[in-house]
Image (cartoon, rainbow, N blue to C red):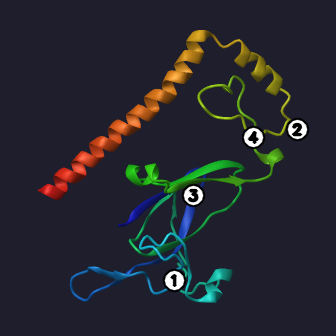
Amino acid sequence: MPHPFHLHGHRFVVLRMGFAEQFNGNGTLKGLNKHLECLGKSNRCAEMKWSNKDWEEGEIPEINKNPVLRDTVVVPAKGFVVIRFRANNPGWWFAHCHLLMHSMDGMNFAFRMGKDKEIPSPPKGFPHHCGIYEELPISKEGSDHLDEIDEDDDKMSKKQKLSCNKGIVIGLETSKIIMLFVGILVNIYVYL
């Protein structure tokens, strides 16, 4: 199945795209792209490597010479996409498949770009105690207003705290409803 992959915080260019091998005439997928080797023994092939060792060092032939900037690309079923982006936006960034059921299955990740002191501190008034999340260690260097933020959080009203907690619960419940709805649609489509 193809995956619409989205990267937050950056735009990238697609340097190369590879498609799976297909049976002649009908487009049915035969197997992985010839440039990929599956390392796992399961049929899901969660770990792969390049068939050609030179590609591991970035020596990939047939690179796109005139790429277009984008933030989303469809990764072909049993294929691959090689992207390049400028790592110039410090922070924690999210990348994920745009199919909700795949994101719920873990086809997403966050990656950190930059050192602690390069990552911007949260804005003034940003709630630190909203929901079930642990506070991340944030560099205090150059962040004089962090103490003010903590004081503001302590002054947060009961109504604000309650709305924070309900927001998380509503978010999870909404996701379940959407998942159920998508699941029903998929089943109806398959049935028809």
- Whole-percent x, y for residue 23 in the image: 27, 87
Q: Quadrant of the N terminus?
A: bottom left
Circle 1 residue:
37
* Foreground label between 3 and 2: 2
In this figure, what is the number of numbered marks?
4
- Whole-percent x, y for residue 183 in the image: 28, 48
Of label 2 and label 1, which has the lower sequence position?
1
Q: Farthest residue in the left direction?
A: 192
Of label 4 and label 2, which has the lower sequence position?
4
In whole angstroms, how far apart are the C-alphas of marks 3 and 1?
Answer: 28 Å
Circle 3 residue:
11
Q: Is residue 70 left or right of residue 120?
A: left
Q: Amino acid at mark 4?
A: Pro
In whole angstroms, how far apart are the C-alphas of marks 4 and 2?
Answer: 10 Å
Q: Could you say whether the residue bearing mark 2 is in a helix, strand or loop?
A: loop
* Foreground label between 3 and 4: 4
Q: Amino acid at mark 1?
A: Glu
Q: Amino acid at mark 2?
A: Glu
Q: Could you say whether the residue bearing mark 1 is in a helix, strand or loop?
A: strand
Circle 4 residue:
120
Q: Farthest residue in the right direction?
A: 141
Looking at the image, which residue is at 30% across and 42% down?
180
- Whole-percent x, y for residue 101 in the image: 38, 51
